[in-house]
């Protein structure tokens, strides 16, 4: 995956500068993995990191100078188009379109494993079961149990080693253990469905669980944030089914995909997909499981725009691809979208649907 490749090259560049005595040995103590973010310039092929500020603080070296030194080494990589210091010391790297396409192809091949990384290697994560929402005494308890279970899975996907945690060890700061006469959680599950309730728990901000009592009240219908995510996954999977029925080439033009996926919507889609492992690790490290569902919603919106601007199937209207290689490249992108959405939903405790 592209962010893993960037992690590796960044760590190698810092290590080389330490060996060359441009940086003191203390620089190697800073964790560089998983620090990439979308660059402020809005280019979907650009990635930025503030790790230079952390290293600079530890080594008393100006971040601008440090970023420039690292950028000089990164520019030697053929899949990196540009690297520079920006914004007073941030390191910004722009990769080639083919590098992003290769990353998407790797995600498509990895399937549910596409969220995995080694960003949190060395950390530990207590394995927690998904909560039995039918037994929850209130929304705060349901949110805490969902958050604990989800964070442990996010951490494990990001490379943390697993430990076993019992219910007694876990504890809770939620409502008292005595069951109220009527808990609102089981009633919401019966009315809205387990996946809808679990997803809303997953995307709820810490300290905001009380809002669920208004949003998930039986008889009150509102927009379900899970729907567009499921619809996007179904659309990506059905695109592949249609391609098979139409006997289209689904193998993917690996060596030219970056060139063929050239529309702004496709480039934006490639950029969004590439951040899944980073988003998973950040959500685990920050104890913010809600960040993953919100990322999935960004993927879903980008996929909708991509399907409209660059449809893969021949009945997609005037924007439909005519050249077989372009069709194949767009089908590769659909497979990557399906993999990312399925992986993210699974880590949220929700089943990814193949059909509506």
Image: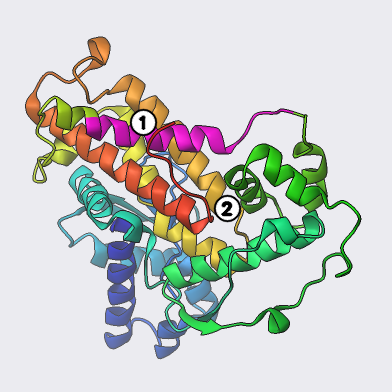
- Among the 4 quarters of the image, the one containing residue 321: top left
14, 307: nearer the viewer: 307
Is 228 magenta? The answer is: yes
Pinpoint residue 337: horizontal percent, then vertical percent: 34, 42
| Mark 2 residue element | helix
165, 136: nearer the viewer: 136
Whether residue 36 is visible here, answered yes or no, is: yes
Q: Is residue 32 above or below residue 238?
A: below
Q: Are marks 1 and 2 in contact (CB under 8 Å)?
A: no
Pinpoint residue 21: horizontal percent, then vertical percent: 32, 87
| Mark 1 residue element | helix
Q: Is residue 271 above or below residue 114?
A: above
Q: Which residue is mark 2?
A: 291
Q: Is 323 left or right of 150, judged from the image as shown?
A: left
Disc sitting over residue 302 in the figure: none
Pinpoint residue 257: horizontal percent, then vertical percent: 15, 40
Whether residue 89 is visible here, answered yes or no, is: no
Q: Is 259 left or right of 11, judged from the image as shown?
A: left
276, 337: nearer the viewer: 337
Is 8 magenta? The answer is: no
Mark 2: few, some, or many residues within 10 Å (few <14, many ≥20)? some
Which residue is found at the position 28% from the left and 58% from the top? 1
1, 112: nearer the viewer: 112
Q: Does the magenta stretch mainly form a helix, a strand or a loop?
A: helix
Q: Which residue is mark 1?
A: 235
The span picked out in magenta is 221-241
Which residue is found at the position 52% from the left and 79% from the top? 60
Q: Is residue 342 above or below residue 157?
A: above
Furthest residue toward top: 318
Mark 1: few, some, or many residues within 10 Å (few <14, many ≥20)? many
């Amino acid at each position: 995956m592209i962010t893993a490749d960037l992690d590796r090259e960044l760590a190698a560049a810092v290590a080389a500068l330490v060996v060359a005595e441009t940086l003191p040995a203390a620089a190697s103590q800073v964790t560089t993995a998983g620090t990439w973010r979308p660059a402020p310039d809005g280019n979907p092929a650009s990635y930025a990191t503030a790790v230079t500020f952390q290293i600079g603080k530890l080594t008393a070296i100006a971040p601008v100078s440090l970023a420039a030194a690292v950028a000089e080494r990164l520019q030697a990589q053929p899949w990196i188009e540009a690297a520079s210091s920006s914004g007073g010391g941030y390191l910004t790297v722009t990769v080639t379109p083919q590098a992003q396409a290769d990353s998407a192809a790797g995600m498509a091949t990895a399937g549910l494993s596409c969220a995995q990384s080694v960003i949190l290697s060395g950390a530990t994560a207590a394995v927690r079961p998904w909560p039995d929402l039918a037994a929850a005494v209130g929304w705060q308890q349901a949110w805490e149990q969902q958050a604990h279970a989800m964070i442990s899975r996010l951490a494990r996907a990001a490379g943390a080693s697993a430990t076993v945690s019992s219910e007694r060890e876990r504890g809770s700061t939620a409502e008292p253990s005595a069951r109220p006469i009527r808990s609102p959680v089981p009633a919401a599950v019966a009315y809205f469905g387990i996946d809808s309730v679990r997803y809303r728990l997953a995307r709820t901000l810490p300290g905001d669980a009380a809002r669920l009592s208004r949003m998930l009240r039986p008889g009150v219908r509102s927009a379900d944030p899970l729907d567009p995510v499921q619809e996007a996954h179904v659309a990506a999977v059905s695109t592949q089914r249609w391609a098979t029925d139409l006997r289209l080439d689904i193998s993917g033009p690996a060596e030219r995909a970056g060139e063929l996926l050239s529309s702004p919507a496709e480039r934006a889609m490639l950029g969004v997909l590439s951040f899944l492992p980073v988003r998973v690790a950040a959500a685990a490290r920050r104890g913010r499981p809600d960040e993953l569902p919100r990322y999935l919603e960004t993927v879903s919106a980008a996929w909708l725009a991509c399907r409209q601007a660059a449809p893969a199937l021949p009945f997609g209207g005037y924007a439909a691809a005519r050249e077989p290689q372009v069709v194949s490249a767009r089908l590769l992108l659909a497979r990557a979208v399906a993999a990312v959405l399925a992986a993210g939903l699974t880590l949220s405790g929700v089943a990814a649907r193949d059909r509506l």
